[in-house]
Every structure is written in structure tokens, then in C-alpha cells.
Image (spheres, rainbow, N blue to C red):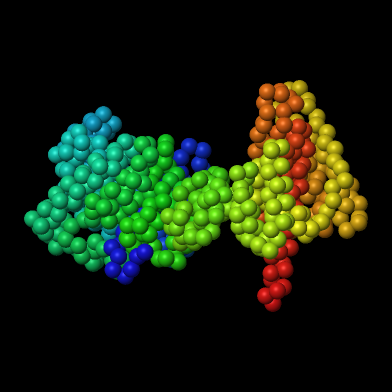
Amino acid sequence: MTTNSSPQLWLYDTTLRDGTQREGLSVSIEDKLRIARRLDQLGIPFIEGGWPGANPKDVQFFWQLQEDPLKQAEIVAFCSTRRPNSTAATEPMLQDILAAGTRWVTIFGKSWDLHVTASLKTTLEENLAMIRDTIEYLRSQGRRIIYDAEHWFDGYKHNPGYALQTLEAAIASGAEWLVLCDTNGGTLPHEISQIVQDVVKVTGAWGMGHGAWGTGKESSLSAIPNSQSPIPNAQSPMPQIGIHTHNDSEMAVANAIAAVMAGAKMVQGTINGYGERCGNANLCSLIPNLQLKAGYSCITEDQLTQLTEASRFVSEVVNLAPDEHAPFVGLSAFAHKGGIHVSAVERNPLTYEHIQPEQVGNHRRIVISEQSGLSNVLAKARSFGIDLEKLKAEAKQILQRLKDLESEGFQFEAAEASFALLMHEALGGRQKFFEVKGFQVHCDLIEGKETSNALATVKLAVDGKNILEAAEGNGPVAALDAALRKALVNFYPQIATFDLTDYKVRILNGHTGTAAKTRVLVESGNGRQRWTTVGVSTNILEASYQAVVEGLEYGLLLHSQAEAAVKASS
């Protein structure tokens, strides 16, 4: 728990630049703007928006934020040092950086002599000149500088003297932050800790010996626009240290924490750990670890309770399925399956939970499976607003029904909506929104065509009225889903807001070949909530039908419950 005296850490989000380098991840301008505003609400002080000039999308992004700025966060432009054997003042890409109109600019430069000679194909001295010239030029234009020391740890391990010269060049030119980057992601925590301590000691000595930034000059930061921002370096005698880690060795979060313990004051990372190759340090893990366990102040407690929602929001916008097993923010982060675990956590959550789920905006889940005991059923029923404490006989019947169905191949730990419907049915309270009386699906497979057409016909009844409806789709399940919606939407307009967001098929007994039993999981959503339903059959269409129908039914149940709650409160 943080207090007013908790040491301050500065968070720097690079989801919109480094995060988008993840394979398979692509965002539009509108997507980037939505994510930036959500991070602003979360209280992230620095949000890296991209590299202005690298593509038209990033140019438009910065222009739009000039028209409609963020409320509290500093939007940061990202760029490299100038090219070898040129001047910063005549470098076209730096003009794009200035045109972006940000107060802060992050410049990355080479720390590893191997990269200077092999990648840049220039001299070590010219690399130092590139760092100095670029930062001095941007400072002369009123910009505040974060210097990302690329490949810092590899460079320091191979040639510490030269690596430190690159930092000294950045300091002498007016950089306010020195961010040490584990760009290849191969450094271990004990190495990170020692090297950060070395840098803190050396830069501290430079500051003591040379005054402001080691130049012998007074700091002129008070004249820079927005110097009233709550950034700690404005009157500091030397730059602060930051950390930027990659996850190639599954160490990004541990390495970032090690750096903070060794003296780093800024932590760079991405939401959900998105990034190139294996990703970046995951802010959704770093923030709660640093704030709730290490005692640092990162964001407010209220903002911390938005962390899970922010994680899932970003997942939705970038169109990647959320990691259900992610620490802190995953759907399963506080899920309990074993009966003994459930019984214990019901008595005292500390027995199996390292923090209160609500601190990060998550919640406890009781998982239902064939391993469940009666305590699982009772706890799960409470999460759906059903009190079975006085109905122990019914609870035992539900538990037995659960185990019977799972022995047939059903899986309710991943299909909680189906389990809720099962409970309502066992208690005699399952609403009959509609009754499906039959369906047919016809598929046309035309040789030479990449896609096939399917036509589904459904017959159902609503309030005693029979409806016959048909619809087409690019496959049998899509056609069946479309026909059901078409038949029901006139009676239940809210179905238009339901989406089928995921569809999974599992073969349960593959040794029987094409006669194998299949399990289908269908995830549905309404823009605010998601729910999963299950179907099992030797006929994949029948299994899909079961899951799709229950998905629609549960969505209608949620809508009905929401309407009842509104009426009760009015």
C-alpha cells in the first residue's frame, strides 16, 4: 500500500510504438487515439505515440492530439539520433519531430560499439557526436529529452568505457532522463541490478563534479514549455535513470523491478507486454508489483482499480484475445478450482490469494469442473446471485448433474454461462425466451471456389408464435447463427448488440475418426460483458447449435436481469 511518503516512480508507456511491433498486431489512427486516451485516464505520465514522419498514420496521430490534447499525460515523440556525417539542424526526420508539437522527445542512440561499427558503419567518435548534436539541437528548440540508451546492457558488458561515454554525451547535451535498454532481452536480474547501480554511482559522481548535467552550466529547464509539469528533473543536478526491458528470456518484469531497486526512477513498458519478438515489460504486472508490494507510488489507488479493464480494453482495440492466465488482470488470475482451495479461500482469501483482486479491478472466480466439491457449487451460485445455502439437496443435484455432463465431454470451467443456465434449470427458474423446434443446414461446395456458401433454416417459437426463418453465411455455423438472430431480433432487439467473438472446437476421442465426439465453446459479448457456452455431440453442427443457442439465451438473461435491476432502483 502506498502512502504520501511513498517514493515516486514515473511510468512510460510505449504500447503505441514498441507494442505495435508485435507480429500480427496492427492499429488504425482511431485505435491509437482510443488507447492513448485510455492510458491517460489510467494516470500514465508519459505515453509514447510513435515516430512522426516514419509513416502518415503517426503524423496524423500527433496532429490530432495537438487539436485535442490529453488531460494529464505527456505525449512523447520518438526518433533516432541524426544520421552519420550530417548535422541535426539539416536532418529532415528531426523536422518531423518538431512538427509533432510535443514537449518531450525520446531519442535513442547506440551504446554498443558493435552496433556503431556493424550497423551504423561509422566511427565511435562520430556516434558520440550524433548523440550530442541531436540532443543539443532539440534542446535549442525548446524540447525536453529522454535518452534511450539502446542495447545498453550488452554494450556495457562488452565495452563499459565506451558505453559510459555515450551516457556522458547525452548528459552533457541536456538529456533529463537516461533510460537503460535491455534491447535483446537477454540480461538476467542480478546483472541488471549491478549495472544499474554502477550507472547511478557514476552519473552521481559526474553530477557532483560538474554541476548541472556535468557541463559546468546552470540548468535552463525552467524556461522550457510546461516546466510546471510534475516531472522531478526540472531542477535536479543530474538526469534520472530509467529502465526499458524486453522479454526474450522471460525476465522483462523481474529485470525492470531489479532496476528500480537499484535506483531507476522511470519504468518503460507496454500494456499486456505487447512488443516485438517475445514482447516488452508488462505494465499490467509491473504497476501492481511496484505499487502494492514494493511500496512505490505509480498511479492513484482509484486508477489502479481500472487496470484490469484497461488491459482488456487494449486487447479489444488491437483485436487480440486477452491472456486469460495473465497475472493480476487475467480472467483466471484469481480463479479457484480445487474443492479444498475453494473451501479455504471462502473462509479466508489470504490462504490462496496474494492480493485482493479488487485492488486491480479484477474479481475472484470459482471454477466449476468434475474436480469440484459442494463448496464450489455454493460459491459459484453466489457469484450468479443464487443462494443455495438453504437448498443443500438441490446443490447436491446440481453437483451430480455437473459431474455427469463432464463425463460426457462437457466442460463448464470454460463455459460459466452454460453452468448458470444449468443451475437455473435445476431450480426450476430457467426463463424460456424461445424454443427451437428444429433446424436444417445446406452447404454448397463448388470446385475451384475458395469459399463455400451455407444456407440455414430454423423453426422456433416465441410466446406461442411459430417462426420460420432462413439466412446465409460463409459456413454452416455462421449461417445458423445468422438465421437464429434474424428470427429473434424482432422480439428481442437487444440481440443486435450480441457478437459471437470466439469459436473453438475440440475433438474428444480422436481414435474414433470422423465419428469422434466434439466439444464446441462459443464466446459471445454485448460490448460490455463476455460469456462462454458449451455444446457436445458426435455431430459438430449439433454441438455448435447447442453452444450458439445457449449464448443467445444467456445474453437475453443478462439483459433481463439488468432491466429488472434498473426497475428495482427507480
Q: Camera-side residue: 287 or 143?
A: 287
Seen as rendered, the residue at the extreme bottom is: 570
Rendering coords of residue 508 (x, y %): 67, 31
Seen as rendered, the residue at the extreme front is: 393
Q: Answer whether residue 211 is visible to the viewer in this image.
A: yes
Rendering coords of residue 137 (x, y %): 24, 52
Quadrant hosting residue 445 = top right
Query: Residue, x 20% and y 38% (percent of image)?
Result: 156
Q: Answer whether residue 45 is visible to the viewer in this image.
A: no
Q: Quarter of the image containing the N terminus?
A: bottom left
How many numbered marks are there? 0
Left or right side of 174 for 54 = right
Query: Residue, x 84% and y 47% (percent of image)?
Result: 436
Identify whether 85 is placed above or below 265.
Answer: above
Rendering coords of residue 455 (x, y %): 82, 37
Q: Camera-side residue: 372 or 76?
A: 372
Query: Residue, x 17% and y 43% (percent of image)?
Result: 164
Rendering coords of residue 489 (x, y %): 79, 55
Quadrant hosting residue 123 = top left
Q: Quarter of the image containing the C terminus?
A: bottom right
Left or right side of 423 for 3 = left
Query: Residue, x 30% and y 41% (percent of image)?
Result: 182
Seen as rendered, the residue at the extreme right is: 465
